[in-house]
Image (cartoon, grey):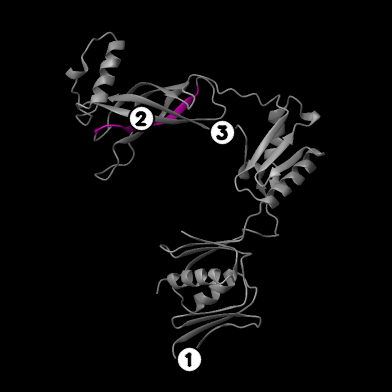
Amino acid sequence: MKALLITTISLFTTVCFGARLKDISSIRGVRENQLIGYGIVVGLKGTGDGKAEFTSKSIARMLDKLGVKLDSQQIDSKNAAAVIVTANLPAFGKAGNPLDITVSALGEASSLEGGTLLQTPLRAANEQVYAVAQGSVLLGGSGKDSFTTVGRIPNGAIIEKDVSSDFSSRKMFRLTLHNPDFITAARTVLTINKELGGQYASAKDAGTIDIVTPYSYENRGVELLATIEAIDINPDSKAKVVVNEKTGTVIIGDKVKISKVAIAHGNLAVKVTSKSGAASKSGEEEKVAVIDSGVSVGDLVQALNKLGVSPKDLITLLQSIKAAGALHGELEIL
């Protein structure tokens, strides 16, 4: 019988543990920006697009800019391929800094191996060019199963324009929690105000916290954010059970509780009562588990594990207990 793989995690607990505020939240306006561009990869070994119309027109247009007049109908090159180039522009990217880029075949090219990306402007959603890419395409993996129509160019782009930002003189900052929760937001506000020595932070909702710049940090926004991000917070979350039926994995929040309930499943009986009991076998091959009311799901799973319950049966039992309203917490099936 396949063994149960059980992992218990603390999702809602009174035991304090510290998570840096920078690891559970983001500063509004401090984020990456996606860049995209259309380019041509040349130097392929007969694995390019051939007579693809958009590739031929792109090559003709490029050659025209280089002073070579050529009708696109005359172009039939299997050594070139049209590609889409993507990159992420960091929040405080500055002109001259390099970027890693991803190059993906757009047409009928079967491989980009050995190719060179020609100068390609990369634009943001506002249509402005923020970087220019060029370089030799590198493919990951090897063998017949390797994916040859997508490659990368480390440091293949150069930022051409600074990302505008002025944090030093801002009068207010806004934090957004990665996992919105009212308790976490309230704890964060209390901790920040204690650290700054005043009422400078306030929660707008379960995931948004506004911070007014104290007088002592005026024109020192970077130092203020460095102080705030280093604060330890005890994050909270809903009690939750996550099960993966394919792998038989069960991830359990330690505060998920079970009320009085009795379930019969095949030759298996589960009873959660107000009296203490233990997992046992009775009758002819009948399996019975008797557990105290108010126990955690972890206790239930351990009792069932002693009876040799399969992952499939465990997941069925958890779903049934949840449907009966006896499992107090969120149940997520992957």
Quadrant showing the N terminus: bottom left
The three-letter code of the residue at mark 3 reads Arg
Residue bearing mark 3:
31
| Residue 123 belongs to magenta span | no
Stretch in magenta = 97-109
Q: Nearer the viewer, residue 52 or 249?
A: 52
Q: Nearer the viewer, residue 317 or 306?
A: 317
Name the image quarter holding residue 69. Answer: top left
Q: Nearer the viewer, residue 163 or 112?
A: 163
Image: 62 above or below 19: above
Badge 3: residue crowd in 10 Å (few <14, some 14–19, many ≥20): few
Residue 2 visible to the viewer? yes
Residue bearing mark 2:
84
* Cα–Cα span, label 1 and label 2: 67 Å
Q: Which of the marked residues, 1 or 2, is nearer the chain's N terminus?
A: 2
The three-letter code of the residue at mark 1 reads Gly
Q: How many marks?
A: 3
Q: What kind of secondary structure does the magenta stretch mostly adopt?
A: strand
Residue bearing mark 1:
283
Q: Residue at x 68, y 50 (%)?
A: 182
159 horizontally vs 64: left or right: right
Q: Which of the marked residues, 3 or 2, is nearer the chain's N terminus?
A: 3
